[in-house]
Amino acid sequence: MKQTLDELAKLKRREEKAIQIAERRLASIGTTLFRELPDKLQDRLWWLVGRAETFQILSNELSIPWELMMLQKPRSSGWPDGRFLCEAFAVARWLHKVVGSNHLPARNIAIVVPQDSGLLESESEKADLLLLAGPTRMVQEVEPAYLAVTEALRSGNYDAWHFCGHGKADSTYPHRTTIQLLKGKTPLRPDDIQGHGDSLKRRQPLIFFNACETGSGGFSLMDLGGWAPSLLGAGAGAFLGTLWSVDDHAARAFAKEFYRRFLGGEPIAEALRRARLHVHESFPGDSSWLAYTAYAHPFAIQGDGDALPQQRPRRQPESAELPAPSVIGRATAPDLEIWVRNDSRDGHPQLRFILHSPSGVLDFFHQELAGPVFAKSSEDWFLQLIERIERLNSGFDERGEILLKAEAASWLANIGRQLYRELFPQELRYAYRHFRHYVRTIMIITDNPWIPWELIKPYDDSDLDDIIDDDFLCLQFQLARWLPGAKPLLPEIRIQRFAFLGSEAFPCSGEERELLRTVAGKHSGVEDVSPGEPTMAALENLLDVGDTQLLHFAGGFEDRAFRPEDLHGPRAAQLRRDHPLVFFNLNDKHADWARRWVEDCGCGALLYPVLRIKDSLAYEFAATFYDALDRRETFGRAVQEARRRLYALEPGIPTWLAYTFYGHVNGQLRLGDS
Amino acid sequence: MINQDPDVRFLIRSGSDFGHPTLTFQILVRDPALGPLLESTGPIRVNWAQFVRRRH
């Protein structure tokens, strides 16, 4: 491939024949890259074309031009008929262990354009950039001299940088890669950024190297190897560059189109893809459109971080203008995500875990670990466990003998320790030793509802000098679950109408109703639409009218007749529009209810018990939960506080661990106009 | 942010096998409708040695 690129370098690309040769050779390079992949991977990537839209490449191996990979029907013969990866998807790269930014302010842009670069279009490109200035954006030219540029970088005044000029690669020594400033003067090197530590962290700027050729240059690889780690490591929010030198005219067109789209509100990967296609259309036969690469969060948008796109933007027809994404509030990323998926080994069900730290407090980056193997299905295993705990709920041990309260608490702790041994394989136990000190919030993302994460109690005496005997996971951490593929997690649920469905004739149910009224009554703009009778018909009426963002079920609701399967058609659609918080504070529910409520009906958050609960404790749980939410604590914190309260009151009665919460661990409730 | 995961994450880890560069690939999808949540392939020896950055 290197040889091919060298050949391409010798071509004058503006000649018709050379254009055809260049196009074919690029397709050949892309095809070679694709066919080098294992068959299984080729099949998978090809299958994703047309189904997936955004594609993130995560690697510390920077030199392979993945964007150029020609996706095509695997194992087909003849001339390839496929699509380049960067054409098929909105692609962005990122590096392992570097925390990304969702927002790139780009309100104070520095441009560096050496006048003596010999590039015909550089002055025009500079003029385009200066035109980006407006009431809320400044664009300033920085003298293209080493001292001036490094001083401006060090000042931290700019939240975007645009360099136009020449780059010089050194693939053997990436740190020697340079960006040329004025001719004969000291160029800029990655060291100049790294040397200032995390100088870029304050502004997290977008940095764009638009490295051009002088007209007859070639395809020599730029090798961004030196720049990407330096810039992102120093705190840059995003980095755009080219994998090889690009045509001067195409580069100007690309930059103009990219900024128009990105500053107009499009997520960065989509703005990049569309700018790419614009250049492809405007400069047929020129390879420049394939040369661009971006290191960024694919959904990073221009802004200050007070807003996020509500939904992942769908790709629009090429001719249509993308609207600016609608926005809602923001929630902090969880410290740890544990993805759990079902697999099998030797015919037995097995779990696999993926550990990832979105907040960056840990260095887990989609780290895959093998999980436990079950002798039977995880559902059977779970039901057997529930049976043991329910026996405890009735005041008996496994042998049917009466348990004292203190004994019950100790017995639960033993089950928790046993679960830790069964469910946490050695690798995960090792990871736990590390993350227990740093983690506050955990999201379990799984479609397997059977693993009782809440009940796990870490105990590890493999190192006698450092024995771990920690509290239950649900007491120790703020824990929440979510289903993979369900609607995006909501950072905030705003309650304008709430309904209580319970009968005051039932123990503690009246107090629970009063509790809700009191909490809601403190805020203007919250309407109580609770029905007179807590019946199925009343629930159906509520769902028909819609616009209720909190449904609280308590004792006395005719839930024996109610099945989540009954929610379908317009009622399910209404729930998806309202995305309410649904709280079942009665009886025990099937652990798999989440699938229906969250996945199919689009609940914003769901809280329900999977074990029998004691009425007075259920009331205490609700009181503590709503009180915490009223104080603007997060969902994760509110559930944790409620559990701790119950554990302090009755540690031997497992009501404190009976609840399962699905929602954003750092999400919040907003009551009325507050 | 969880609510902003891309549809596909393509993870590439480089390594070596008796001095020959290798790559391990993982495809992680956001939505089960896009296939298995995680698939791993490799490590495989790659013939793109000229693209794989030399280490020092």
Image (cartoon, coloured by chain):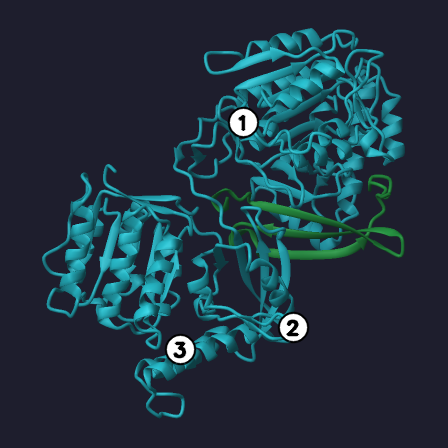
Mark closest to the chain's N terminus, 3 or 1: 1
Look at the image and tell me in which quarter the C terminus of chain A lies: top left
> Which chain is depicted cyan?
A
Dot 3 crowding, Cα within 10 Å, few <14, some 14–19, many 20+: some
- At 46% across and 12% down in the image, what residue appears? A135
Pointer 1 chain: A
Same chain for labels 2 and 1? Say yes or no: yes
> Which residue has dot 1 on it?
A318
Dot 2 crowding, Cα within 10 Å, few <14, some 14–19, many 20+: few
Q: Amino acid at mark 3?
A: Ile
- At 40% across and 32% down in the image, what residue appears? A326
> Which residue has dot 2 on it?
A463
Comparing labels 2 and 3, the label whose residue is closer to the camera: 2
Of the chain colours in the picture, the one used for chain B is: green
Q: Quadrant of residue A552?
A: bottom left
Q: Nearer the viewer, residue A59 or A206?
A: A206
On residue A386, the disc is: 3
Left or right of A294, for residue A13: right
Q: Quadrant of residue A118?
A: top right
Compared to residue A603, the image places residue A121 above or below, namely: above
Q: Nearer the viewer, residue A481 or A392?
A: A392
Mark closest to the chain's N terminus, 2 or 3: 3
